[in-house]
Image (cartoon, helix red, strand yellow):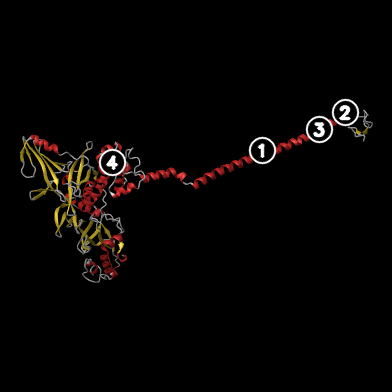
């Protein structure tokens, strides 16, 4: 088919051979068919290429986004699966995370001090340990060396430890103790023993001498001011001259199981040197000053309270007490005393006297035999001063003697010691105390002067508590209306017999209250006016209360007084200020747990 040609200007059909258009006269530029076709083809191809290229770019972008997304998703799932794997591993083996901690705990269970053979312990390391823990820590050091224990307590404890191998007999080990242990181990044992001594000292001080230490503590707190009658057990010279800081220690001088109490002041902090001011022993259930037994009689060790002032006392290595008296360089008396077991009596062990150029030796406390300078100096050098004592600040003494017994509740202790008596008391209260002259019960409850309409209609309720006021291991029973005491009782150990500590009519003439430091305060009134303020302390194992200090007024003058056979006796002059200070000396104990008697 013949291809038609048209004029590009007017569109008139022309012959392919025409040079000009027959219609508009425009020149027709002839073109090669192949070129035109090629050109058309190339144009079409270029347009198609551009379209194809655009599509490729779009597709490439989409693919890139898809690839990036896939990479991100892949990384996410990789991380997730990795964490999940770790979590799964942790869950399947929880010891992996805590293995180090558990190893430490297991090691702690195995040892009290895992490194006490290679590292020095400090006071801080051992200060919070109990007596039992200290003993185990000390024996742990020698247990590492294979020492066999015969004490069942230590034997069972160390045989439960995986590291322990008992291979050395006690006698063999103890004989080679110095060679078996290194210096660190020896030092740690000595440190532990020191703290064991401190705990034992605290226990013995509380058990036997709490009342003495409280009195000294109070005197020191008040600057040793006031009348001596307020502090009957304190060295009187302290009340005249005072002291910087007081210390105390306990030492069992005669190995009878009951230690002696020593009060001192620090003279030289560099040495250190402690000057002993007072010495107490314990006999017949009470602390007492030591005395000297001479022939068949006894005399006070320090009758004029010269101890620590004109007379010097020290404790020797073999637990002798050395007393040095001096009246100048040419007259000196040195005496060594030995304490008898289960007593507060000292006997002369040895002694040396220098009087100018004359020398004497005294071994009986009576007549002295002539001697010479060599023997005199030998005696002075024979008994060395004890250096390994641990003195504690008096201000740091903590009185645990009168706190509520911790082993049981108040109701449990009351039932254990006073159950039958409290049930009897409860029954009488429920009956309104209508029966007169009830045994061991305060007659005030049936007295119409105090309860005009009878006890039942008075609205009064009684309460009870138990406190170990005497620090003898047996609690006292106290009955009150939560304001004042109406009954105070002890119980005779081994017999179960309840005994009153005061007259039964407590509250009739004197108002009694429980104060701090285990004191019972009594207000004796004349009408509404307080005439006597007295403090009583319950005696250990004695089942009675003793007045320790009192002040009296006749409304014009003031006196310190003592209670003798139920009567107040003048002791020394006092002031109104003394009266007020006595009243405030021991505040009411607000921490006592009182329980209602009717609920017993």
Q: Earlier in the sequence, mark 2 or mark 3?
A: 2
Residue 91, horizontal then vertical, whole percent: 50, 47
Q: Tell me how far mark 4 sits from mark 1, CA to CA.
A: 76 Å
Secondary structure found at label 4? helix
Crowd rating for badge 1 (residues with CA inside 10 Å; few <14, some 14–19, many 20+): few
Instruction: Give the residue at mark 2.
Output: 32
Residue 64, numbered label: 1
Q: Tell me how far mark 4 sits from mark 2, CA to CA.
A: 121 Å
Quarter assignment of residue 531: bottom left
Q: Earlier in the sequence, mark 4 or mark 3?
A: 3
Q: How many marks on residues?
A: 4
Q: Tell me how far mark 4 sits from mark 3, CA to CA.
A: 106 Å
Residue 558, horizontal then vertical, whole percent: 17, 54
User: Are the residues tagged 4 and 2 within 8 Å (C-beta)?
Assistant: no
Crowd rating for badge 2 (residues with CA inside 10 Å; few <14, some 14–19, many 20+): few
Instruction: Give the residue at mark 3.
Output: 43
Residue 189, numbered label: 4
Secondary structure found at label 3? helix
Secondary structure found at label 2? loop
Q: Tell me how far mark 2 sits from mark 3, CA to CA.
A: 16 Å
User: Are the residues tagged 2 and 3 within 8 Å (C-beta)?
Assistant: no
């Amino acid at each position: 088919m013949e291809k038609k040609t048209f004029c590009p200007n007017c569109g008139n059909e022309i012959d392919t051979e025409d040079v000009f258009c027959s219609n508009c006269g425009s020149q027709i530029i002839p073109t090669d068919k192949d070129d035109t076709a090629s050109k058309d083809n190339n144009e079409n191809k270029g347009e198609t290429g551009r379209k194809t290229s655009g599509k490729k770019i779009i597709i490439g972008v989409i693919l890139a986004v898809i690839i990036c997304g896939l990479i991100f998703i892949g990384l996410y799932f990789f991380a997730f699966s990795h964490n999940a794997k770790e979590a799964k591993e942790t869950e399947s083996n929880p010891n992996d995370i805590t293995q180090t901690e558990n190893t430490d705990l297991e090691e702690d269970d195995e040892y009290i001090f895992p490194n006490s053979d290679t590292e020095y312990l400090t006071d801080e390391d051992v200060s919070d340990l109990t007596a039992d823990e200290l003993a185990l820590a000390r024996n742990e050091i020698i247990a590492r060396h294979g020492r066999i224990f015969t004490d069942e307590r230590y034997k069972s404890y160390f045989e439960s430890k995986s590291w322990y191998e008992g291979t050395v007999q006690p006698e063999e080990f103890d004989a080679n103790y110095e060679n078996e242990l290194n210096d660190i181990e020896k030092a740690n044992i000595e440190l532990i023993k020191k703290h064991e001594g401190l705990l034992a000292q605290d226990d013995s001080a509380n058990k036997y001498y709490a009342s003495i230490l409280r009195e000294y503590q109070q005197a020191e707190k008040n600057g040793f001011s006031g009348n001596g009658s307020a502090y009957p057990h304190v060295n009187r010279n302290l009340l005249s001259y005072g002291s910087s800081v007081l210390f105390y220690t306990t030492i069992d001088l005669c190995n009878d199981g009951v230690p002696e109490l020593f009060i001192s002041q620090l003279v030289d902090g560099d040495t250190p040197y402690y000057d002993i001011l007072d010495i107490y022993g314990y006999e017949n259930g009470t602390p007492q000053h030591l005395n000297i037994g001479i022939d068949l009689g006894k005399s006070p060790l320090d009758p004029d309270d010269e101890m620590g002032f004109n007379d010097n006392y020290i404790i020797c290595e073999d637990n002798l007490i050395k007393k040095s008296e001096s009246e100048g360089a040419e007259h000196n008396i040195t005496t060594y005393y030995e304490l008898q077991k289960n007593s507060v009596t000292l006997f002369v062990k040895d002694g040396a006297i220098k009087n100018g150029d004359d020398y004497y030796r005294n071994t009986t406390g009576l007549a002295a035999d002539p001697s010479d300078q060599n023997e005199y100096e030998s005696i002075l050098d024979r008994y060395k001063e004890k250096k390994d004592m641990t003195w504690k600040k008096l201000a740091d003494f903590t009185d645990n003697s009168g706190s509520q017994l911790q082993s049981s509740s108040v109701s449990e202790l009351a039932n254990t010691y006073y159950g039958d008596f409290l049930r009897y008391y409860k029954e009488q209260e429920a009956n309104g105390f209508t029966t007169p002259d009830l045994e061991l019960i305060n007659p005030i409850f049936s007295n119409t002067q105090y309860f005009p309409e009878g006890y039942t209609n008075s609205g009064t309720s009684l309460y009870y508590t138990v406190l170990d006021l005497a620090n003898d291991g047996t609690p006292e029973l106290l009955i009150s209306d939560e304001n004042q005491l109406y009954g105070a009782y002890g119980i005779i150990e081994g017999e179960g017999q309840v005994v009153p500590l005061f007259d039964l009519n407590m509250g009739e003439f004197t108002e009694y209250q429980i104060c701090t430091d285990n004191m019972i305060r009594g207000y004796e009134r004349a009408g509404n006016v307080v005439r006597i303020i007295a403090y009583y302390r319950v005696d250990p194992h004695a089942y009675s209360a003793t007045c320790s200090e009192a002040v009296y007024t006749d409304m014009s003058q003031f006196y310190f007084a003592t209670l003798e056979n139920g009567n107040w006796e003048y002791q020394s002059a006092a002031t109104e200020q003394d009266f007020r200070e006595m009243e405030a000396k021991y505040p009411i104990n607000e921490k006592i747990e009182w329980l209602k008697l009717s609920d017993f």
